Image (cartoon, rainbow, N blue to C red):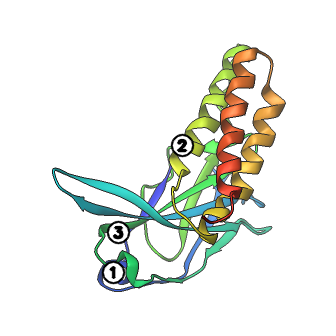
Amino acid sequence: MLATVTTACGMLGTTYPEMHGRVLHEIHDAPLSHTILVALWKGNQDNPGADKTICYHVEYTVSDDKGFFTIPDWREPGDFKDLKEKSVHVHAFRKRYRTSELTSEIITPKNYIYYLAKPRATDNEDQARKDRLRYLQQLIGDTICDLKGDSRANLKPMYEAIVEEAEELVVTAQDREIVQKLKSWLSFVTLPEE
């Protein structure tokens, strides 16, 4: 579900370079345009007894007509200098697609390939619907970033698209409950900064 990049600049200093990549279909290597991607900056915070991973920045981008995308460079403020094991986690969403097992978890800042695939075929439509709703829930769960400020709002386009697809899948009361949970996360990312 994710790709991670650990950059030397990010680990030693406060500047993360621009990251370039491309979204391709798993089987055909065809470019997938208009795919929403979010990059989450994470690091480990020293806590007595256990480290805690926190998300401290989010960027958003969309792949172009040829599947290419750029995550802009970012200069980290001094507030996060004490975090350890900093990394950037990239997640992609495209309606009726899922992250492929071919997508590497370790990426480099340049020329990264993010593979997407159609959901696995099944004759059981009910199970396919449930699996897709579970996938959408997992994608939001993987991208939750409990931070304040403008950066959190960069999750909004992905969350809106996820909620839109989930609403189309609603058949049962349980499905509606799932959509309500997804909508609550959409509301969270659109809250004004406290």
Q: Name the residue under label 2.
A: 141
Residue 8 is tagged as 1
Which circle, 1 or 2, is nearer the viewer?
Answer: 2
Question: Residue visible at 45% across and 81% down?
Answer: 76
Query: Residue 118, percent across and down?
Result: 69, 38
Q: What residue type is labelled 1?
A: Ala
Residue 93 x/y as whole percent: 67, 51
Q: How far apart are marks 1 and 2 (CA)?
A: 28 Å
Q: Mark 1 vs mark 3: which is more N-terminal?
A: 1
Q: Earlier in the sequence, mark 1 or mark 2?
A: 1
Q: Residue at x 67, y 63 (%)?
A: 153
Q: Do the residues labelled 1 and 3 touch (CB within 8 Å)?
A: no
Q: Is mark 1 on a helix, strand or loop?
A: helix
Q: Residue 14, how many percent across, how many down?
A: 39, 85
Q: Name the residue under label 3.
A: 86
Note whether 156 is above or below 17 in the view shown: above
Among all residues in the image, which is located at the extreme right? 168
Quadrant in the picture for residue 181: top right
Question: Which is more N-terminal, label 3 or label 2?
Answer: 3
For residue 26, say whether it is visible.
no
* Number of the front mark, 1 or 3: 3
Instruction: Locate residue 76 relative to residue 44 in the image: left or right.
Output: right
Outermost residue to the left? 49
Mark 3 nearby-residue class (10 Å; few <14, some 14–19, many ≥20): many
Dot 3 lies on which element? strand
